[in-house]
Image (cartoon, rainbow, N blue to C red):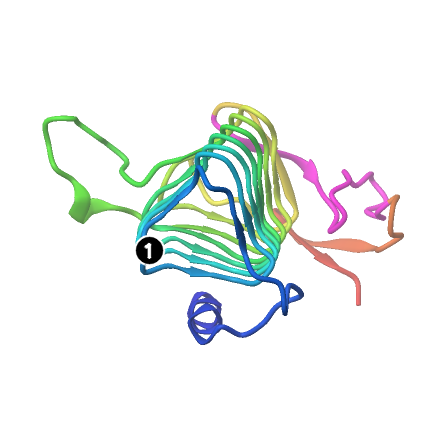
Amino acid sequence: MLAQLVSRLRSGRPGRGTGRAPQIHPSAYVDPPVEIGAGTRIWHFCHVLPHARIGCDCVLGQNVMVGSGVVIGDRCKIQNNVSLYTGVTLEDGVFCGPSCVFTNVVNPRAEIERKTEFRATLVRRGATIGANATIVCGVELGAYCFVAAGAVVTRPVAAHALVAGVPARRIGWMSHAGLRLGPDLVCPFEGRRYRETGPDRLEAVP
């Protein structure tokens, strides 16, 4: 999946923003070479470092930093004051709430260089990360999972899981539409049905 996402961005395959040039606010800094898809909007005081890849129809709010080598898929929304450090990959449709935090080193020290110890963080399609949540590097957030505001994620999160707390633990399930599922596992917005296929696994009913 990651290889396909990178290949698509490199090839410039159009998304739903076809025909619309990216909009970059004059106060933002974009350091070439970078790849920015059609229809993407980059707002005040953002900084995009070299070799970052940003898909189509994304929105980067004020004061967002996108590190070197970061990959962002199509239709992602990154709210104010978020830093995406080297090693972070967002698939399509990811929402990053204001001031959520990513890391790329587990045990940082100011006096010790650890750039060779960066750990990758993969956020799967449609995931939501709440305001002020912290995502410790080296984990994978499953597709359409939902990380509550202020949570600290220290281990992988299952697809559709609703996690909260410090450290974050699953407290429920979320639908594709972002609503918490009740005991019947039916989305109250779309009517889509789900089923549990394991102790920590949920899937949509075909």
> Residue drawn 70% across and 57% down?
203
Q: Using the image, determine if residue 42 lies above or below residue 131.
A: below
- Is 146 in front, or is 203? 146
> Residue drawn 64% across and 50% down?
144
Q: Is residue 153 visible?
A: no
Instruction: Indicate the amino acid at tag 1.
Output: Gly
Judge left or right: residue 160 versus residue 85. right
- Is 83 in front, or is 102? 83
Judge left or right: residue 4 versus residue 59. left
- Is 115 in front, or is 205? 115
Q: Using the image, determine if residue 154 lies above or below residue 75.
A: above
- Is 145 in front, or is 69? 69
Q: Which residues are magenta?
A: 167-187
Judge left or right: residue 85 versus residue 143. left
Q: Secondary structure at mark 1?
A: loop
> Where residue 169 sits in the image (x, y, percent)?
55, 32
Residue 177 in the magenta stretch? The answer is: yes
**Which residue position holds label 1?**
69
> Residue drawn 58% across and 50% down?
76
